[in-house]
Image: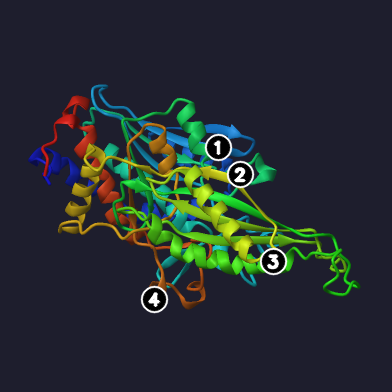
Amino acid sequence: MTALDPQRQAWYERACARIDEARMCGLIGRLTDVHSPTGAERAVCELLVAELAASGLDARYQSVQGESGNCIVRVPGRGEGPTVLLYSPIDTHLDADPGQDLPWVGPELRADMLPRTLERGGSLIGLGSSNPKSMVVSIAEAVRCVVEAGVPIAGDVVAAFCGGGMPWVVAQRGNAGIGSGVRHLLAHGVTADAAVIVKTWDDVYHEHPGMAWFRITVGGSLGYSGIPRGIPEFRSSIVPAARLILELEDWLIAYPERHRSREILPQGWIAAVRAGWPAKPAFPPAAAEIYLDVRTGPDQSLPELESELRSFVRSVAERHPELDARVELIVSFPGARTDPAHWIVRSALRAWQATHGRPYPGPPPMSGISDAAVIQRAGIPIVRIGYPFRSGEALPPEFRDGLGGMGAVAPADLVGTIRQMIHIVVDTCTRRRADLAGEPAT
């Protein structure tokens, strides 16, 4: 792929020379110390607005609803080039409240699950310090460096950090989540010719997973613990639900290979089970609920997925007549694909190769959800880039078990991603909009 011309290479190197790891480290810490669970991002957004405005950037807070909101930064160009959106969510996936999170996160809230930054083993530890706070800081640093280096951009650079990005629905905070912040952003004054989303993994993706949540309700009859088993007046809901869970797990294990695409290997998990009253186990319930999260590729339709799952559950019921199950789709959005020949994808690949000094080998297939599909479906071509996710031996032993609070990062790990964003901005926003249609094929 074509490298930057000498003038753009000089702008790129000048901007990269402004990357400041100490500045990044400080901002990650300050953002991590401000709690921002989904639907309650106002305080962290206002802090970020103040920080970036103090640097001379045009930054503002956008209210979504209640305490949920977005931070928007705009660097204006000369008005003749393409507008590029640099995007990251800003909310965290845990409440950091023992009453809400225990025992589901484990026996205790570890340090990486709390909104309080500490340094441990070369990592900054704290709830969301990696995802999303370091993603936010990476974009902010890239924008600062471009501005400080005086790169003469023809098109605008817009950086947006949205609340409501995590895949959960928070009823007590206006049903925030599942892209609520970015949907508001795109409907209220922000658009772009192309976009870059920053997530974990140092790869380039032009395919973006979709998501479907299902509730399967297994019926029975209200019982009493003093009743003998086997009488016709009582049908358990919990035991048939347990049988269905085991069969669903086998279906989910085989599911990814049936629906894989070039970059997406869509996964599915049984993520929650609910039945009865913990305070009165003397009364077995008339219903048990099973909740599934099933990811989709860019070529899957949600009605087809729903039909596939319903057909499978019916086949189980045919073999187990005691099973009375109803399948409901409760949350969904489809996957998406950006044309791999689009400028923004090719520019991201050039940026990766320039940063790593070798041809890009292609990404490992994944199904990690993001707001990318929402942005693409809104008509904005988008590419995903990222940074190495700290895991295994890179972490202190007490933080290696499970996903945790996505709360361990080293600022040095972000430098490559920042260089890639700078490369994309220089490669794209210093051109006229019409120039982007004329890239020669490789």
Residue 425 occupies quadrant: top left
> Which mark's residue is nearer the viewer, 3 or 4?
3
Q: Residue at x 39, y 76 (%)?
A: 393
The answer to whether 260 appears left or right of 214 in the picture is: left
The answer to whether 16 appears left or right of 112 in the picture is: left
Image position of 101 with respect to 148: above or below: below
For the image shown, how many numbered marks are present on the structure? 4
The answer to whether 95 appears left or right of 58 in the picture is: right
Which one is in front, 410 or 40?
Answer: 40
Amino acid type at circle 2 is: Ala
Amino acid type at circle 3 is: Pro
Q: How is the image coloured?
A: rainbow
The 10 Å Cα crowd at callout 4, few under 14, some 14 to 19, many 20 or more, is: few
**Pointer 1 residue:** 69
Name the element at disc 4.
helix
> Which mark's residue is nearer the viewer, 2 or 3?
3
Q: CA distance from mark 3 to mark 1?
A: 43 Å
Q: CA distance from mark 4 to mark 2?
A: 33 Å
Q: Decide if residue 374 is in sight here.
A: yes
The answer to whether 186 appears left or right of 203 in the picture is: right
The 10 Å Cα crowd at callout 3, few under 14, some 14 to 19, many 20 or more, is: many
> Residue 55, position in %: x, y?
38, 38
- Which one is earlier in the sequence, the residue at label 1 or at label 4? 1
Name the element at disc 1.
strand
Cβ–Cβ below 8 Å for labels 1 and 4? no
Which one is in front, 51 or 398?
Answer: 398
Which one is in front, 280 or 94?
Answer: 280
